[in-house]
Image (cartoon, rainbow, N blue to C red):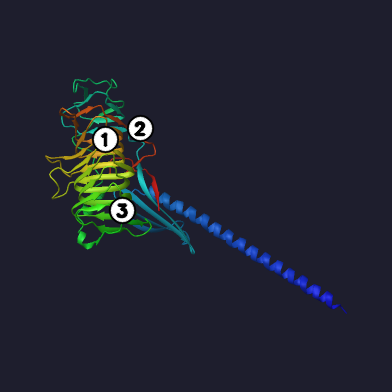
C-alpha cells in the first residue's frame, strides 16, 4: 500500500503539472493571437499603402468614392474617397480585415519640378521694363516686345545683364487656364443659399477630416476670433472680418468680402466675390489660399489687397471668365514675401521690396512708387523660381502642368 503522504505528493505534483501545461497552452494561444494580429496589421498597412498609391496615380479631377478589391479574392478591400478641399485634393483611404480597421487622411498636391517658369506675362503688345535691383531667376514667357532696361525715378537697371536668368519664350494674349470644374465648385459655394445652413456660434471647434464636413452660415458683419481647425466650411452672403486673435487651421471661408486684421497668423483658404483686404504683418502658413472670383453681381473690380510686411506661403489668385475693362487686381504692399504662386487674370500691383519665391502669372504689372504709377515696370523686386522649396506641391487648379501627385500634408 502507498502511504497517504505519497498520494498527497502525487496530487500536488499533478496539480503543478496541470498549471504549467495550461499556462503553456495559454501562452502559446496568446502568442498565436498576437502573431495573427501583427500579420493582419502588416497586411492592413500594405493594403493602406496600396490605396494611397492608387489615389496618387488617379488623374481624375472630380469627387469620387469607391471600394476596391485589391487582389480579386474578396479579402483585401480598400475604401477610397477623394474630393476637393478648396483648391487642394483631399484623400481618405480606409482598409479593414475582420474587426481591424486603419485609415489615413491627406492632402495631395501637384509636383512642379518640371515647371521652371518664374514669370508668365500676357502679350499686350508692350514690353516689360526692369529697373533698379530687380532680379528675375527662372524661365520667362514674355510678350513678343520682350524685356528691356529702363530708368525709373532717376535710377538705371543694375541687375543681371540678360535681365532674366533663364530661357525666354513668347507668351500669348491670355494666361494658361484654370481648372473649370474646380472654379465652378468654388463659384457654387460662393452662391450657396445660407438660409439653409445653421448659424455659426462656437468659439472653439475642431472637426476631423475623417468625419463629415461641418458647414455653417456667418451672419452679416461676423468677426471670426475663435480657435477653428479641420473639416469646417464657413459661408457668408455679406462681409466677414477675421480677427488678429483668430486661430484658423485648414478651414475654408466663402464671402462677398473678407477683411483680415493686422497681425493675423494662420493656415486657411479664403474665397471672395468682391474683395479680400489684408492688414499689415499678416502671416499665412503653407498651404494657404486667397482667391477672388468674379461672378454676376460682383464688385466693379474684384481685388485682393495685401498690406505691408506680408508673409504668404501658398497660392494667391484672381479669376474672371472673360477679360473686362476693369480687370481683377492683386496688390502687394511694401516688403511683401510670397512663397508659392501668384496668378491674376488681370493686374498685379506691387511696391518696392516685394519678393516672390515661385511663379507669377498676370496680364499686366503696375508698379507703385511715392511719385507715380508705372505700367509693366518692375522696380527693385525679386522673382526667384529657384528659391522655392523642392518639396513644394501646387494645386490642380492650374491647367497645363504635370499631373504627378504627391502627399502635401497628412491630416487628422
- Position of residue 151 relative to residue 322, above or below, is above
- Which residue is nearer to you in this view: 167 or 302? 302
Where is residue 212? Give x, y as percent: 34, 60
Lower sequence index among marks 3 and 2: 3
Badge 2 element: helix
Q: In the rendered image, which residue does mark 1 sit on? A: 360
| Residue farthest to the bottom, as pictured | 1
Q: CA distance from mark 3 to mark 2?
A: 34 Å
- What residue is at 76 percent from the left and 71 percent from the top? 14
- Badge 1 crowding class, 10 Å Cα cut-off, few under 14, some 14 to 19, many 20 or more, is many
Q: In the rendered image, which residue does mark 2 sit on? A: 387
- Position of residue 254 relative to residue 174, above or below, is below
Q: CA distance from mark 1 to mark 3?
A: 33 Å
Q: CA distance from mark 2 to mark 1?
A: 13 Å
Q: In the rendered image, which residue does mark 3 sit on? A: 226
Where is residue 410? Give x, y as percent: 40, 49
Badge 1 element: strand
- Which residue is nearer to you in this view: 138 or 299? 299
Lower sequence index among marks 1 and 3: 3
Amino acid at each position: 500500500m502507498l502511504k497517504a503522504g505519497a498520494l498527497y505528493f502525487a496530487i500536488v505534483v499533478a496539480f503543478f503539472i496541470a498549471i504549467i501545461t495550461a499556462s503553456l497552452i495559454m501562452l502559446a494561444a496568446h502568442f498565436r493571437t498576437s502573431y495573427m494580429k501583427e500579420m493582419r496589421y502588416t497586411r492592413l498597412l500594405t493594403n493602406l499603402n496600396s490605396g494611397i498609391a492608387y489615389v496618387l496615380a488617379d488623374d481624375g479631377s472630380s469627387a469620387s468614392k469607391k471600394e476596391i478589391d485589391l487582389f480579386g479574392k474578396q479579402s483585401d478591400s480598400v475604401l477610397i474617397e477623394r474630393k476637393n478641399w478648396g483648391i487642394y485634393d483631399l484623400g481618405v483611404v480606409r482598409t479593414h480585415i475582420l474587426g481591424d480597421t486603419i485609415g489615413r487622411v491627406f492632402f495631395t498636391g501637384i509636383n512642379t519640378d518640371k515647371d521652371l517658369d518664374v514669370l508668365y506675362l500676357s502679350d499686350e503688345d508692350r514690353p516689360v521694363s526692369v529697373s533698379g535691383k530687380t532680379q528675375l531667376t527662372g524661365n520667362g514667357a514674355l510678350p513678343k516686345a520682350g524685356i528691356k532696361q529702363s530708368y525709373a525715378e532717376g535710377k538705371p537697371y543694375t541687375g543681371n545683364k540678360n535681365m532674366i536668368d533663364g530661357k525666354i519664350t513668347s507668351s500669348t494674349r491670355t494666361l494658361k487656364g484654370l481648372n473649370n470644374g474646380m472654379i465652378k465648385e468654388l463659384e457654387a459655394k460662393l452662391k450657396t443659399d445660407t438660409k439653409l445652413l445653421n448659424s455659426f456660434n462656437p468659439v472653439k471647434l475642431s472637426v476631423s477630416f475623417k468625419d463629415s464636413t461641418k458647414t455653417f452660415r456667418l451672419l452679416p458683419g461676423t468677426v471670426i476670433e475663435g480657435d477653428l481647425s479641420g473639416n469646417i466650411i464657413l459661408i457668408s452672403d455679406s462681409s466677414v472680418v477675421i480677427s488678429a486673435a483668430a486661430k484658423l487651421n485648414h478651414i475654408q471661408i466663402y464671402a462677398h468680402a473678407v477683411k483680415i486684421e493686422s497681425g493675423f497668423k494662420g493656415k486657411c483658404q479664403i474665397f471672395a466675390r468682391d474683395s479680400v483686404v489684408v492688414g499689415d504683418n499678416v502671416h499665412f502658413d503653407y498651404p494657404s489660399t486667397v482667391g477672388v472670383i468674379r461672378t454676376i453681381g460682383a464688385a466693379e473690380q474684384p481685388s485682393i489687397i495685401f498690406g505691408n510686411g506680408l508673409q504668404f506661403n501658398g497660392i494667391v489668385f484672381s479669376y474672371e471668365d472673360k477679360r473686362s475693362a476693369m480687370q481683377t487686381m492683386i496688390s502687394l504692399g511694401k516688403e511683401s514675401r510670397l512663397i508659392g504662386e501668384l496668378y491674376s487674370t488681370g493686374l498685379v500691383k506691387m511696391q518696392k521690396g516685394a519678393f516672390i519665391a515661385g511663379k507669377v502669372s498676370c496680364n499686366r504689372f503696375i508698379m507703385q512708387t511715392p511719385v507715380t504709377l508705372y505700367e509693366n515696370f518692375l522696380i527693385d523686386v525679386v522673382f526667384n523660381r529657384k528659391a522655392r522649396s523642392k518639396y513644394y506641391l501646387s494645386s490642380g487648379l492650374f491647367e497645363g502642368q504635370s499631373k504627378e501627385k504627391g502627399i502635401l500634408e497628412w491630416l487628422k
